[in-house]
């Protein structure tokens, strides 16, 4: 088996460390996460947005401990242990970040306790949100890895990777409601959450790749200026959102952890799949 990325710093730092410490006490609802993982951050943001009581358990998914594999045979974080029955003494597992996020939104839907739902009630609007979540997962995020894992040996140029990535972002920006910063306008929701962790990681492309991400500066977007202005409004709101900031470790550690992606030497399942042009795990 290929060498796994087990040398990643072991735990949360900065704001995320404070949040993790506030949720270290035993609780039957457990999120098994890795601080560096954007899929984990999706689930963590939902828990934090809805103020759902839970325990955060930091693990290194590359080490594949037997008790972790028993919960999630795919061996990936996020993995959620869900309490079963009245006493909540036994637990059932859930995995896949989008499944976990929708589960939490539905299972904790009492608005008086957990605030507004993250998906709209109207069936068409719910479906439309899922459509754009699919675009985020299969087009934008796939494009992010193709971009950050670009090396001069690839059969595509960095310019192609950048253009493809920016095109997918513009396609999403076109769908954003004009009335507010979020995808749905004034209402923050699941579409925003599903992309937020990668928005936060864009600085890694600026750090590692010649020419950086390439989102045009204000007034420089040419015929797409309106779309880019809409994207910047969304992006600025995301980086200022409390639940996003408080699930974020120190920038320097992401730079360290993503070096393997930037050099395309990671042996993570995400890295291996994207290197071969396969679907994300
Ligand atoms: N499709 C999964 C992807 C999760 C995923 O790839 N997690 C990575 C960390 S960011 C992982 O656990 N990797 C372990 C490995 O590659 O062995 C989801 O949405 O939850």
Image (cartoon, rainbow, N blue to C red):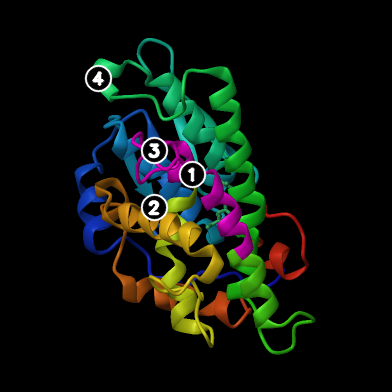
Q: Which one is nearer the viewer's eye here, 177 or 239?
A: 177
* Residue hosting label 4: 113
* Residue projecting furthest to the top: 86
Mark 4 or mark 1, earlier in chain: 4
Q: Is residue 218 left or right of residue 278?
A: left
Residue drawn at point x = 72 percent, y = 70 percent: 275
Of mark 4 and mark 3, the one earlier in the sequence is 4
The residues bearing labels 2 and 3 have C-alpha atoms spaced at a distance of: 10 Å
Mark number for residue 36?
none
Q: Is residue 6 visible?
A: yes
Instruction: State the residue at coordinates (80%, 81%).
Output: 155
Tell me, for residue 176, which label it has, or none: 1
User: Which residue position holds label 2?
Assistant: 234
Q: In terms of image quadrants, where is residue 207?
A: bottom left
| Residue 150 occupies quadrant | bottom right
Label 3 secondary element = loop
Closer to the eye: label 4 or 1: 1
Binning the other alpha carbons within 10 Å of mark 4 as few (below 14), some (14 to 19) or many (20 upward) gives few
Q: What distance separates the C-alpha of mark 2 from that of mark 1?
A: 9 Å
* Residue 232 screen position, x and y as percent: 39, 60
């Amino acid at each position: 088996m290929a060498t796994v990325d087990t040398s990643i710093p072991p735990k949360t730092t900065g704001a995320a460390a404070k949040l993790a410490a506030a949720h270290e006490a035993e609780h039957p609802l457990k999120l098994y996460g890795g601080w560096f993982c954007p899929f984990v951050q999706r689930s963590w943001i939902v828990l934090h947005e809805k103020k759902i009581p839970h325990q955060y358990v930091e693990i290194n998914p590359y080490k594949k401990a037997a008790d972790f594999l028993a919960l999630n045979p795919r061996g990936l974080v996020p993995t959620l242990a869900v309490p079963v029955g009245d006493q909540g003494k036994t637990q059932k597992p859930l995995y896949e970040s989008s499944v976990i996020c929708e589960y939490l939104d539905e299972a904790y839907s009492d608005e008086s306790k957990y605030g507004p739902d993250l998906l709209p009630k109207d069936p068409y609007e719910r479906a439309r949100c899922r459509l754009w979540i699919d675009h985020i997962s299969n087009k934008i995020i796939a494009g992010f890895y193709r971009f950050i894992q670009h090396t001069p040996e690839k059969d595509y140029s960095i310019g192609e990777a950048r253009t493809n990535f920016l095109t997918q972002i513009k396609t999403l920006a076109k769908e954003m409601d004009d009335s507010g910063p979020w995808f749905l306008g004034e209402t923050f929701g699941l579409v925003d959450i599903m992309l937020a962790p990668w928005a936060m990681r864009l600085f890694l492309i600026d750090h590692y790749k010649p020419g950086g991400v390439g989102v045009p500066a204000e007034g420089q977007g040419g015929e797409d200026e309106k779309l880019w202005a809409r994207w910047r409004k969304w992006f600025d709101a995301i980086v200022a959102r409390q639940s996003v900031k408080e699930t974020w470790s120190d920038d320097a550690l992401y730079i360290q952890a993503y070096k393997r992606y930037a050099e395309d030497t990671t042996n993570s399942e995400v890295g291996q799949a994207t290197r071969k042009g396969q679907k994300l795990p």
